[in-house]
Structures are given as C-alpha cells and as structure tokens.
Amino acid sequence: MLRKRIIKEVKKYFLIVVLLLVGLAFRLLLSPYGNHIDLIINTGWGNWLWENGPKNFYTNNVWIYAWPTQLPLINSIYSFNFDIYEQVLWYIAYFGEVIVTHHIFPDYFTWLINLRKWFGTDLYQVTPFTNGLLVSMKIIPIVVDILTASMIYIFGMRLLTSKKSLAITAMFLIMPFTWYESALWGQYDQLSSLMVLLAFFILFWKQIGFARFLISPVILVLAFQIKPTVLFLIPFYCVVYLIQKPRMQNFFLGIVASVLAFYLTFKPFVVGNFTGYIVDHIYPAVFNNDRYGLVNHAFNFWQLLYPRGGWSTTVTLFGIKALYWGIFFWFIFMALGVKVFLKHRSFKALLVSLMLISGGSYVFMTGMVDRYYYLTAITMIMLLGYYPRLAVYVITSLVLFSINLVYTWGYPIIPIGAVWNNNLLIQLFSLLQTLTFIVVSKKLISQNLGRHA
C-alpha cells in the first residue's frame, strides 16, 4: 500500500515537472524568432541605461527608435537583460574553450561553437544588438511563464484535484497567447500579471502573519511599474486589504513600505526635485493621452463600433464621450467584483472578482491595447478548475485573444495591412470577444450572487 502511494506521488510530480520542462524548452526554441519592433525599442532603452546609467534617461533627446514611454522599473529590467546576455555568452564561450582545450569529444560539440558565434552576431547591421541579446530580452518573460504555470499548479493542488490542477496548468502552457507574448514578442505583461496575482494571494497567506500586509502592497507597487494598468484594480485591492483586518500599525507600515518601494525605484532616474521631475518628465512620457486614443488593436467593444480604432478621444455614443462610458462600465464591473468578494470572501470569489474587473476594463474602457487581456485570461483558466462547464466559452475567449495578438503583429505570415483594413472581420472578432466575456461574466455572477450561490 505504501509503495503504491509513493509511486502515485512520484508519478504526480513527475508529470508536472515534465510539463514545465517541455513548456520551457518549447519557448526557448521559439525565442530566436520574431523580434517585434517593440523588442528592438525596449532593447534600445535598456542599452542606453546599461551604458549611461539612469540619470537623464527621461530627458535625453537623442533616441534611435523611440522616446521612453515606460516607468523606471521596467526600463531597469531591460537594462538588466544586458547582464543576462553577458553571463550566458561567457558560459557558452567558457564551456566551448574547455572542450577544445581538453579535447573532450570536440567533434560532438561543434554545435556549441556555432551557438557561440550565432549568439554574438549582430542581427541587423543597422543596430548594435546581437541575436543572443534579443534572445536574452525574452528570458525573463519565458521564466515568468514557467513560474505562472507553477503557481497555477500549486493553487490547483491546494484547492482542487490533482487532475484539474494538471489540466489547467497544461492549458496555460499550451495556449498560444502565453508563448506568443513571451518567446516571440518578448513582452512583459505576464510579469505584471503574475505580480498582481501574488499581491492578492499573499493577503490570504495568514501563515506569514503581519508580513503579508507589508509584502503585498510593495509587490503591487512594483507591478504597477511594469504595467500601469494595475491602476484599474487599486480600489478592489484596498477592499481586499482592509477585509483582512490589519492592525493599525501594520496598515501604516504597509503604506510606508509601498511609498519607500516607489521612491527607491524612481529616485535613481530623478534629477533635482523628486516630485517636480516626475510630474514634468516621467508622467507625461508614460501617460500621454494621445498614445492610445479610443482603442489600439484590441478586440473589444470600441473596436466593434469603430473597427479602424483611431486616435480620437472625442468619439461619442448617445451624446456622451467614449471615455466616460468606459469609466461608467469600469465602475459597474468594479461594483460587481466587490459585491462578489464581500459575499463569499473566498479565494474563488477573489478570482471571479479579478476576472470581472480586469476583463470589464479591457472590453469597455478606452485606450486599451491588445495585450491588456492577459490577467483576465489567467484568471479565466484558473476559474475553469471551479467551473468546468464554462470551458467552451473560456477557450473561445482565449483563442480570440491569441488571434488578436497575431493579427496585431501579423507574424509570421499574416498581411497586417489587409487584416486591419477588413472592417467586417475585425468587427466580427470584436463582437465575439465582447459577447464571450459578457456570457462568462453573467454566468459567474449568477453562480456567485444568485439565490443558491
């Protein structure tokens, strides 16, 4: 009996380890491909920081690709990727030299020598960036994918069955939107999403005592510096935080820790007056209203009504500006999310609320970018463990999200111009995504706020 139990446990963990390793290997194999212009721009910012340091980063007026439009922490990560590149390149070169010097079957390791050459070769003649450097820019997003999958599995093992846990973890790793964003595009939305989830989850981790009231808000502040869309969740986070009933001193310590985290990450970039520099230089660069306008290639409600998107922020519906409609719907979904959580105060209710608020923001608010659906997609996958009957709707939504990313970039074979000039097709996808989200939301609300909830 004991032997069977041990074999069962080993088999259970063996499967998840294999799944994670396959997911990691698949993404690493994809990483040399793609290289979106966003990746080149981000690498340019990281290169400037790596060579010059953070001072004058936001006031420098000579840029090859684009002026900085992101917050200090994410730019610091772009710079850190240069250290990753140097370390990987050094180890490849070192092992290659050891093999050649000591004649350790050199004929079998010619691939390592070729890898060293390829890794250090410029990808484009007009840039100083090598193949290996651009791959290194994708390593953190790829690792975050694996960490997110591990988190989903741990969540499933604690609150669901092992089979369900394995199933939702596999779904996350397989779904195109995950590896397309990390291994091909090299974006960091998954890092922000993981940090947001951790910030909320830690509030439920009572075993660490008062430390959760310090660690959680700090993580949320850092997540905001990866992607400012975290702002949409701040009111709900405050509700969840206060529901945990922190002592007054812990509450103020949490505020102090958050302010300190904000200050320490911004300070290296500031020249002169701290507040004045942020207001005059960093805030305008990051929160420029003209960057996104009505909608930026997101399959949502506004893309449905105005398939060409556009940059105008003055679009009206029934005489009311689109911006105000977006805020109104955000408030509705925020209220529903808070109501669900206050009624149940459970981990499941937390996931439902996060899905409603993040998804409602994406579908109905203005200025949305295609990638902003990432957090909603993760929570949908995790909720399948509780609501497997929603699988058809959830999978449909995730596939549409994946199509949205591919259509936005056009890689590898889609003619992007032809796609976004096809109004009917874009309206169809936007309608399907909007309706799918509404159906999933309606069913979850009914399950959690109905008479028999």
Image: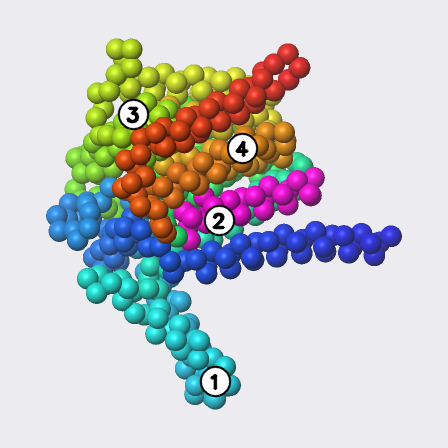
* Residue highlighted by disc 1: 107
Give the mark toward the camera: 4 or 3.
3
Where disc 4 sits, the SS reads helix
Identify the mark at residue 306; answer none if there is no mark: 3
Q: Is residue 3 above or below residue 122?
A: above
Identified by mark 3, the residue type is: Tyr
Where is residue 427 drawn, in percent x and y?
A: 36, 28
Label 4 vs 2, first from the N-terminus: 2
Residue numbers of the magenta segment: 161-183
* Residue highlighted by disc 2: 145
Taking the magenta stretch, the answer to whether it contains residue 165 is yes
Residue at 56% x, 58% y is 21
* Magenta stretch prevailing secondary structure: helix
Identified by mark 4, the residue type is: Val
Identified by mark 2, the residue type is: Asp
* Residue highlighted by disc 4: 394
